[in-house]
Amino acid sequence: MTTDWAEIACEVPAAMVDSLAAFLVELTGNGVSIENLHLDTFSLDSLEDSPVKQVKGYLPLDPALEETRSKVERFLVEHGPSFDGFVYVPPVVSTIRNEDWANNWKAYFKPVRIGERMVIKPTWEEYQEAEGDLMIQIDPGMAFGTGAHPTTRMCLESLERIWLQHGNGTLPEPALDVGTGSGVLSIAAALMGAQRIVAVDIDPEAVRVTEENLAINGVADRVAASTTDLAELKEEFGVVLANILAEELVRLSAQLIAVVRPGGWLILSGILTEKAAMVSAAFSTLTAVEAPTEAEWSCLTFRKEERG
């Protein structure tokens, strides 16, 4: 059965796109599109140089729509005046067919090389692998991310650096992927040799998409994907990855620190650079290792000290 979705379109100055996109993702739990280009979750790539952008959020067409529209209006009214050139324009709500959205954005998702060894390829594209490539095939489903956005790319590059410096050619195990989305990070961990990976997401649809992508990449036997709450995980992990919003990272900081084993690694992403210091402060009990940035985003890597 085809589902109808609501599209909420907002016109804002270019400087406001970043904060509005992050707000819509947090509010709706889905991806955003910008100037009619359906991009990766949060994606600000391929924007044209115009002073006003159109940012669109998506959510099911249900009784909660009016409340969501009101929240978007309040966000624009409260935050818009802080940006030069802002003129309040009420958000426009329209209906879009699931099947149309699910196919139109595919034209913008192409194979991309990340780090030294990884290539992310959509399942419908051809790509000639080079020797030693770690090929990650992805069918993201609706709005769960292709892996090409800076937040995910920096996570993957940090993970690869840990893998390459780890003496026996595999990742420290087990691995934990918090907010797995389409499963890109879990698949990468498996291709880097991890034999047991736990992937969790609050959205059952994300878990379904992840399980499909695990099967496509032949690593389903190594990854357990579920909606298990982070607080319910009692074991410790050699590598923990969390690519979620900065505020959520801070809220979950105690739980994330607790699941990193002594000597283990914690990679945090989804962080606007202006919020990186706030996130770092919440993880001050760990040793900061690196903090690469790309565009407006930061990725923070920490290590937990060995037990004395």
Image: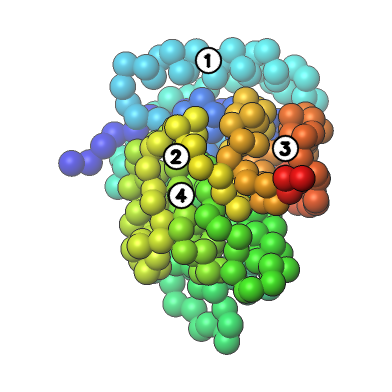
Numbered circle sitting on residue 201: 2
Residue at the bottom extreme of this rendering: 131
Can residue 306 be seen? yes
Of the 4 image quadrants, the one containing the N terminus is top left
Residue 92, horizontal then vertical, whole percent? 48, 24
Front position among marks 3 and 4:
4
> Label 2 amino acid?
Asp
Counting labels gives 4
**Residue nearest the viewer, comparing 64 with 155:** 155
Front position among marks 2 and 1:
2
- Disc 2 and disc 4: Cα gap in Å? 10 Å
Q: Badge 2, how many Cα within 10 Å: few under 14, some, many 20+?
A: many
Q: Determine which residue is flagged by label 1.
A: 71
- Mark 2: secondary structure: loop
Q: Determine which residue is flagged by label 4.
A: 198
Q: Are marks 3 and 2 in contact (CB under 8 Å)?
A: no
What residue is at 35 percent from the left and 54 percent from the top?
A: 211
Numbered circle sitting on residue 272: 3
What residue is at 59 percent from the left and 12 percent from the top?
A: 74
Residue 244, horizontal then vertical, whole percent? 59, 38
Front position among marks 4 and 1:
4
Front position among marks 2 and 4:
4
Numbered circle sitting on residue 173: none
- Disc 3 and disc 1: Cα gap in Å? 22 Å
